[in-house]
Structures are given as structure tokens and as C-alpha cells.
Amino acid sequence: MAEAGTQHFVCIGCPMGCPLQLVHEGSEIREVSGYECNRGAKYARQEFTEPRRGLSTTVRISGARWDRLPVKVAGQVHKGRILEAARAIHALRVEAPVRCGQVLLKDLLGEKGLDVVATRSMERAASKASS
Amino acid sequence: MLGRLEKKYDVVVVGGGPAGMGAALGARDSGAGRVLILDREPDPGGILLQCVHSGFGLHYFKEELSGPEYAERFLAKVVDRDVDVVPDSYVSGIAVDSDGSKRVRLMGAAHGIRTIQARSVVLAMGCRERTRGAIRIPGTRPSGVLTAGLAQKLVNMKGVLPGRRVVILGSGDIGLIMARRLTLEGCEVLGVFEIMPYSNGLTRNVVQCLEDFGIPLQLSTTVAYIHGRERVEKVTVAPLGPGFKPEMSKARDIPCDTLLLSIGLIPENELSQSLGIELDRITGGPEVSSTLETSMPGVYACGNVLHVHDLVDFVTNESLLAGRFAGERAQGIRRPADNIHLVPGDNVRYCVPHTLSPEREHTIYMRSKKAMKPCVLRVGNLLEKKLRFVVPAEMIMLKIKPDLLERFQGDSLRIDIHEESGGEEPHG
């Protein structure tokens, strides 16, 4: 029989931070407890089988009031590939104007649907912000 | 409309962050016709614009947004409701006339120096960061020592890294978020040090910002000395002994070029003080009634200028309410004065608002003095609520229904938090 065990996680789905327990036998999940909502149940399962994280960062933008445009990955990145994903995103260069939600890079790290999108609209600006 | 500035408004809101935008929306919802937001930055949105990480809006928008997304959505709502928003305008003073009407003086690139008439004013200036001077770290005064929020703005908006090898003092959420942010940008974050025996940030941020990246969090530890002539060269960290004194015999040096401070926020109330508004010594913000009105009639406060919040969604809820009451007042609607004082009791550092009225439902925001689990929160002898845990870093929110207060005879209500099994006697 596969080895049984319990893993403990803290849910990162919302600020409540529910303490989660996951009972498993080998790679098979037997029971998840400790969550107050479904996000927690889902998170524990995901964390046990294949941990993933959301990723937000910035990219260089020219022609805007600011020098950086905030972006996020639509979907979640393998936890072990976060830094690699960040480096790939940081290689991007964009030009104002940009609309919030605009896709700047498709299929990050070759993963279908893992798009990098702008999280802010930036108009073309004649001058930089002074503050 | 963005950029439009008239001479007279029902409600003028000082500050265009989440609190100011929420207040403006609340004022419009109440029926106030002319509402203006003044903001000193070139883009409205406040600190949300530099918070590029996600985690905002789960309550209000029912989805997880980044700071700039939250700001942009909210600004769109505000402009859509025909609120005037004037960025790049600094409010230098507010005067109250004998008839109670207000004059707001502003300076701005687009409009010069102007005075605007307002029936009600909402203060939504937010807060600023505590600096090295507030905790008097010994050592030299090199460059490379800066607050975490300033570093956040430099990195996320200006594209400037504060340094390469970074030590962070204080485990507030901004410090934790910046530990991850700088790691993503290729910096080496050598550790987060916290004087308290627990983290001051949300547990989920300890997990996803530190543990995920193997960044050590050392509790009950402080930065005891800063070294370096022109630039930070190293810091000395030491565990704290009795009386929060660093134990120098156990100290060690960490070579680094940057020290970020995430050691707390102070509500920015110079404008409130110039109006003679009464401030709460604990929160650093105005004392407010249940309509979020300050001691100056017709002047309201909400968001981090009132008390420092953990979650923007709570700021939004509070601000919608402040705006609503400011808008009502501007239309001549007067609510009965509050007749119940809230008194922070055992393990309660503060409560906001400071007074209540049996007239309607209330949301009370409070913080505990120390961590406890599990525990019971008692509101006089009217209400008991069991809590899984309390920690000073997480605000406690309590809804009170009007029928509960109708039965209440006294003029002050004490709020206490006790250990569930604890021996302390409840106060009546």
C-alpha cells in the first residue's frame, strides 16, 4: 500500500489564510479540511499535485508618463518556473498607448493560454511624471 | 469629468486614492449633484497604482485584481457618475465660514491658485510611511536606507532599483510584498527582520512572498546598527532581549547595499490639524461619529487618513459610507446625533467610529493589542462573538444591528477581547 501522510498548507486565496490539512496515500488525495470556502479546497489539491502561483510584475514602456507598465499573467505559473517567467516578461518592451487587459505576450514559457496582459492603461504623454 | 473644475460643489473630496474615489461615489449615490476629487499626483488612484501585485477587490469586485486594475475600474465608475476629478492639484488649506460652508484652497499646474466653495468636505489623504528617524536606528547615515513603499514606487513606476543586496526591517505587508518584488527583479533579499515575535503582515504574504522564494523571516530581531560611508555597506542585526533591547553579544553583520524599512504607517493629518479637528492619539486619525464626520461639522474622513487599513476593500466600504453622509449633509439632511460612546477595553487598541447611534446598522473596525486564540469579543453585555484568533496586524470588523442598540440604556459601550477559556471576568 502507498505511504499515507498529512500535509499542511496555509491558503493564499484570500487574506483569511485558512490553515489547510490534506490527507493522502501516496499521490492519492483522501481528504482536505480546514478551509472556509472552495478556494481553499482547490488550493490544497493544487498545492499537493502541482503548485502554481499568480505572477505580477512590470515591463518597460516608452512614450508614457511612467517608465514601467504593470502586467500580470492571465493564469498561473509553475511555482518552480516563476523566476524564469519573470525574466521572460522583463525582456518585453512596449510603446504607449496601451489599454488595460491588452495581451502583450502570448503563451508564456510555451504554455498555451498563459498570456501576459497589461493591468493599466497608459496614454501617450509628452512628458514624464516629476513626482 | 477628468480635469473639469467649477467654482462650487456639494462635496469636495481631498485625495484621489481608493478612499477618495469611494467617497465621491458614495456622495453621488446619496443624490449630491456636484462632486469634486482633488489629487496631488498626476494620475488619480493613489498608492494602488504602485501596488502591481494582485489581491485587491475580492470583496468589492468579487475577483482578484492588481492595484492598478482596481484603481482604473473605480476611476471609470467615478467619471461615469459625472464626478469631476482634478489631478496635479494640491490642497493647501480649508477654511470654514460662519454659516458652515467651506472654502477649499488648491494649487495646481492647470488651474493656478483657486478657491472652491464646498458644502461638505471629505478628507481622504491617506497615510505616509514611518522612517528611520521614527525608530532611531544607530549608525552612519549613508544612502540606501529607504522606506518600502518608496522603493515600491521607484521599482514599479519609475523602473529604478534601490540596490542589489537588500535587507528588510519590519514584516508589514509592504515589506513582504517588496521582498518578492525585488527578488523577481533579480535582487538578492537577504532576510526580513521583525522586532515582534509574530509577523505583522498577512500569513498568506509570508507564504507567497517569503517561503516561496526561500527568504528568511527572523522574528524578535532588529537592525541594531547601519554601517557605510557613502552607501550602506552592512547592517548589524541582533535578537531582542528583555525590554526589547538588542542582545549585542548575539549580533551578526550582514553585508548589503540597501535597507528597506516597513515599520508602519502614519495617517497624514496636517490638513485636519490646521482645521482644528480632534485626533485620536492611538489611530493618529480624526475622531469620527458613526457618520464618519469629524469634530468639524460637515468635514468627514475615511480610509487610511482615518486609521490604517489592511485591505482596500474595507477602505472602499468605509469611504462609500463617508461619501454618502457627506452628500446627505450637503443636501440639508441631518441625522440625529450619536448618543453612545465606544470605549476600547481589554485587548482592544482602538475602535472606529468613536460613537454610535441606535438609528441604523454599524460596522465597527478595531484592532487588538496582542495576539490571542481562540477568543471572545464582547460588546458591553449586548453581543458576544467567538473569533478563531486575533492579531494586531489584522483588523477586526464587527457589524452591529440597530435592534441591538435600541435596547441599550447607557451612554457608553465597552468592547473587550478575552481568551475563550480565560479566567478574566467579562465586563458588563
Image (cartoon, rainbow, N blue to C red):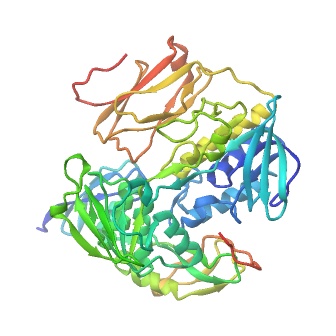
Q: Residue furthest left?
A: A1
Residue A120, image x, y percentages? 64, 70
Q: Residue at x 77, y 80 (%)?
A: A126
Q: Residue at x 41, y 46 (%)?
A: B394
B369 above or below A50?
Answer: above
Among the 4 quarters of the image, the one containing residue A21: bottom left
Residue A24, image x, y percentages? 21, 62
Q: Is residue A107 visible to us here?
A: yes
- How many discs appear? 0
Among the 4 quarters of the image, the one containing residue B119: top right
B141 above or below B282?
Answer: below
The residue lying toward the viewer, choosing from B23 and A44, is B23
* Quadrant of the drawing holding the N terminus of chain B: bottom right
Residue B314, image x, y percentages? 54, 46
B412 above or below B172?
Answer: above
Q: Is residue A72 visible to us here?
A: no
The residue lying toward the viewer, choosing from B104 and B13, is B104
Judge from the rendering whether residue A46 lies leftward or rightward of residue B71; answer left or right: left
Q: Residue furthest top?
A: B409
Judge from the rendering whether residue B247 lies leftward or rightward of residue B91; answer left or right: left
Among the 4 quarters of the image, the one containing residue B306: top right
Q: Residue furthest right?
A: B7
* Quadrant of the drawing holding the C terminus of chain B: top left
Q: Residue at x 24, y 52 (%)?
A: B245
The residue lying toward the viewer, choosing from B310 and B298, is B298
